[in-house]
Image: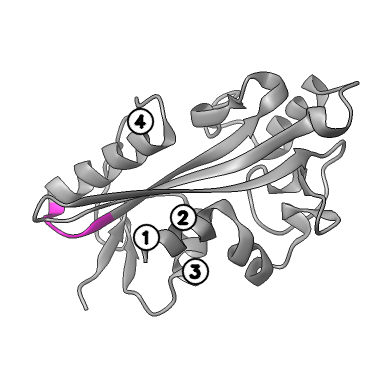
């Protein structure tokens, strides 16, 4: 089987995709010897995933997969959305970002704290075919940071049906229900 390049430099995302797609030969950009920055200037998760997948596929001529994902908070008009990674700056820690989002929702209660993780996965093939799929994981924005598993916004997305945040789920459990897991299942 040919390798599939995952157009990402996010080591946590690469690890998660490789775990979810066990049995597939997924290699990161770093493993493929690719060191380029791709400007994500799309207005949707799907557009950004396609921008990345197309760029690396054109550069390498190999099947390329890309993910664009983030957190949408309904009370904040779906912010940070496609700007999730860039929210408050690329170099700002997620601990600071998470605290800031919780603070923005101070006094907001119950279902008004609704939000979701969104993931769009794009796969571009050398023959010109493109596949794009979306997965979501609904939840509520927690009132405090909880959990050391996962990464990014995982410790503030509370999943009522599990009674815990995404950051408190075991990786195997999270991968079965996550936005990324759902999108990758559709891509398979």
Q: Which residue is mark 2?
A: 183
Q: Which residues are magenta?
A: 60-64
Query: From the viewer's perspective, is the residue at label 3 or at label 4 nearer?
Result: 3
Mark 3 / mark 4, whichever is N-terminal:
3
Q: Which mark is residue 178?
A: none
Q: Residues within 10 Å of mark 1 (few under 14, many from 20)?
A: some
In the rendered structure, does residue 154 fall within the stretch colored magenta? no
Majority secondary structure in the magenta region: loop
Mark 4 / mark 2, whichever is N-terminal:
4
Q: Which mark is residue 40?
A: 4
Q: Nearer the viewer, residue 124 or 39?
A: 124
In the rendered structure, does residue 62 fall within the stretch colored magenta? yes
Q: Which mark is residue 187?
A: 1
**Image vertical order of residue 68 relative to residue 32, above or below:** above
Res 102 quadrant in image: top right
**Image vertical order of residue 84 relative to residue 30, above or below:** above
SS for callout 1: helix
Residue contact at pointers 1 and 4, CB within 8 angstroms: no
Mark 2 / mark 3, whichever is N-terminal:
3
Residue found at x 68% / y 20%: 76
Give the quadrant of the N terminus.
bottom left
SS for callout 3: helix
- CA gap, disc 3 and disc 1: 12 Å
* Residue 182 on image: x %, y %: 52, 58
Left or right of 51 in this view: 146? right
- CA gap, disc 4 and disc 2: 19 Å
């Amino acid at each position: 089987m040919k390798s599939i390049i995952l157009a990402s430099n996010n080591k946590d995302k690469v690890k998660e995709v490789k775990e979810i797609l066990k049995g597939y030969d997924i290699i990161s950009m770093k493993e493929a010897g690719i060191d380029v920055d791709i400007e994500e200037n799309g207005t949707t998760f799907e557009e950004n995933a396609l921008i990345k997948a197309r760029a690396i596929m054109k550069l390498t001529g190999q099947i390329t997969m890309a993910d664009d994902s983030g957190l949408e908070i309904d009370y904040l008009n779906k912010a940070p959305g496609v700007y999730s990674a860039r929210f408050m700056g690329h170099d700002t820690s997620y601990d600071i970002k998470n605290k800031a989002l919780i603070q923005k929702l101070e006094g907001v209660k119950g279902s008004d704290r609704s939000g979701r993780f969104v993931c769009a996965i794009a796969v571009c093939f050398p023959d010109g075919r493109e596949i794009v799929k979306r997965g979501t994981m609904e939840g509520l924005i927690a009132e405090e940071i909880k959990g050391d598993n996962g990464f990014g916004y995982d410790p503030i997305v509370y999943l009522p049906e599990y009674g815990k945040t995404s950051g408190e789920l075991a990786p195997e459990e999270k991968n079965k229900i996550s936005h990324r897991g759902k999108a990758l299942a559709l891509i398979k």
